[in-house]
Amino acid sequence: MYEKRDYSGLLGTPGFSDMLLTDHFTLYEGYVKNVNSLLGKLAETGAETQEGAELRRRFGWEWNGMRLHELYFGNIRSGAEKLHEGKLRERLITEYGSVETWENDFRSVGAMRGIGWVILTEDPENGGLLNTWTNEHDAGHLAGGRPVLVMDVFEHAYLRDYGIKRSEYIDAFMRSIDWNVAEKRLS
């Protein structure tokens, strides 16, 4: 059984109303509940049945919804600082030429039309850092890629506070990144 994580420490984060965050936490808790429910049903049904196959398909959606939210909430914090000198900064400069160029690219991925996730992904094979778009929880992930920084760009992440002004939400997200967490996610 998976336990929901407590992200209430994020309440009061500038750029994110407590109501928005509380609603978002509730959505995340639903993914945890559904993962546990599906695991129980799969144990009863068995994956070889038609019902089991459908449950297995649904499991990827729920599991990734749970994990992506944990990564997202885990890499934001109230009172975040700017990216400091260190391994992540050096790698972004090596990969993109400058931190500003990387940030512009990350923001542009987040500003694309559609719903999904923006993930700074590390390629464990060559150490490259790629800004990627994941359209749905269970589609678009780079196989073997390691998420370093995750930004939720489904409407539930910003609509209550920003309406359709996604760029203002992206600004708030960028000001709230916990760079220490992102750096620890590097291999």
Image: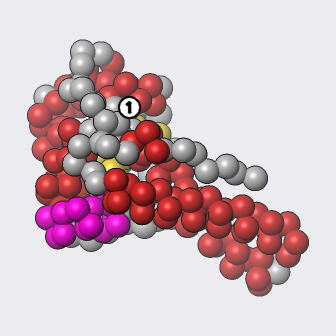
Drawn side of residue 116 relative to residue 59, left or right: left
Residue sitting at x 27%, y 67%: 160
Counting from the top left corner in percent of width and height, residue 22 is at 42, 57
* Residue 79 is inside the magenta segment: no
Element marked by disc 1: helix
Mark 1 surroundings: few (<14), some (14-19) or many (≥20) residues within 10 A: many
The reply to whether residue 106 is visible in this rendering is no
Task: Give the camera-side residue of 154 and 5.
Answer: 5
Q: Is residue 116 above or below residue 50?
A: above
Residue sitting at x 32%, y 43%: 12
**Residue most extreme to the top:** 85
Drawn side of residue 52 relative to residue 115, left or right: right
Residue sitting at x 34%, y 32%: 178
Q: Is residue 92 above or below residue 72?
A: above
Drawn side of residue 74 relative to residue 42, left or right: left
In the picture, residue 111 is in which quadrant?
A: bottom left
Task: Give the camera-side residue of 156 and 46.
Answer: 156
Counting from the top left corner in percent of width and height, residue 80 is at 27, 30
Disc 1: which residue: 182
**What colouring does the structure picture have?**
secondary structure
Residue sitting at x 22%, y 48%: 15
The reply to whether residue 36 is visible in this rendering is yes
In the picture, residue 45 is in which quadrant?
A: bottom right
Counting from the top left corner in percent of width and height, residue 156 is at 35, 66
**Residue most extreme to the bottom:** 50
Counting from the top left corner in percent of width and height, residue 145 is at 46, 43
The magenta segment is 152-165
Residue type beneath disc 1: Ala
Q: Is residue 102 above or below residue 54?
A: above
* Residue 158 is inside the magenta segment: yes
